[in-house]
Image (spheres, rainbow, N blue to C red):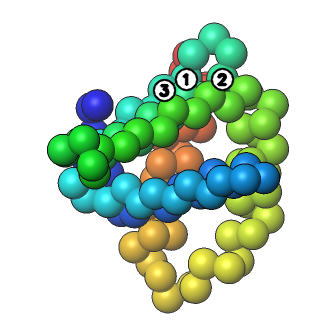
């Protein structure tokens, strides 16, 4: 894992007969990257066997683009006074945009 989780992630996985939920916070680590077919994300909480957990996701580019579009459409739900999170998101999206142009 390359980076500490800077905020919080809550993951829920629901099956007909089971429900799993996990939280990843500052003591957890994450790795995210693009590969030839999409976006890969790993969240990992280290520790003893009874608290250790991880999730691994791979999302194709088409779905990722759809997710980004949905996020853009719902950005008004972030309070205008929440400048910290608005700035964090704007900077990260700007970096992604610039990297796509330069690559």
Residue 38: give its label.
2
User: In the image, is 93 to the left or to the right of 67?
Assistant: left
Figure check: 21 above or below 79: above
Are dots 3 and 1 in contact, CB under 8 Å?
A: yes
Residue 10: percent from the left, percent from the top? 50, 61
Q: Which residue is mark 3?
A: 33
Percent x, y of residue 27 = 22, 54
Q: Quadrant of residue 25?
A: bottom left
Return the residue at label 1.
34
Task: Report crowding for label 2: few under 14, some 14 to 19, many 20 or more residues within 10 A (C-alpha).
Answer: some
Measuring 28% from the left and 31% from the top, which residue is drawn there?
Answer: 1
Tell me what residue is drawn at x 28 percent, y 51 percent.
Answer: 51
On the image, the x and y values in percent for residue 34 come to: 55, 23
What is the secondary structure assignment of the residue under circle 2?
Answer: strand
Q: Is residue 74 left or right of residue 93?
A: right
**Label 3 Cα neighbours within 10 Å, binned few <14 / some 14-19 / many ≥20:** few
The residue positioned farthest toward the top in the image shown: 36
Badge 2 vs badge 1, beta-carbon distance below 8 Å: yes
Q: Identify which residue, 32 or 56, lies in the foreground.
A: 56
Q: Depth check: 73 or 8 in front?
A: 8
Please state the horizontal and vertical placement of residue 58, each as a whole percent of the image.
62, 28
Q: What distance separates the C-alpha of mark 2 from that of mark 3?
A: 9 Å
Q: Where 96 sits versus 86, above or below? A: above
Graded by Cα atoms within 10 Å as few (under 14), some (14 to 19) or many (20 or more), the crowding at tag 1 reads few
């Amino acid at each position: 894992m390359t980076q500490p989780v800077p905020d919080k992630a809550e993951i829920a996985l629901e099956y007909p007969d089971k429900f799993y939920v996990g939280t990843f916070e500052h003591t957890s680590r994450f790795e995210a990257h693009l590969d030839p077919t999409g976006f890969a994300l790993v969240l990992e909480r280290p520790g003893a066997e009874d608290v250790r957990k991880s999730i691994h996701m791979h999302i194709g580019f088409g779905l990722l683009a759809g997710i980004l579009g949905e996020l853009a459409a719902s950005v008004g739900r972030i309070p205008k006074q929440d400048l910290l999170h608005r700035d964090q998101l704007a900077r990260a999206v700007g970096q992604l945009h610039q990297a796509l142009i330069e690559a």
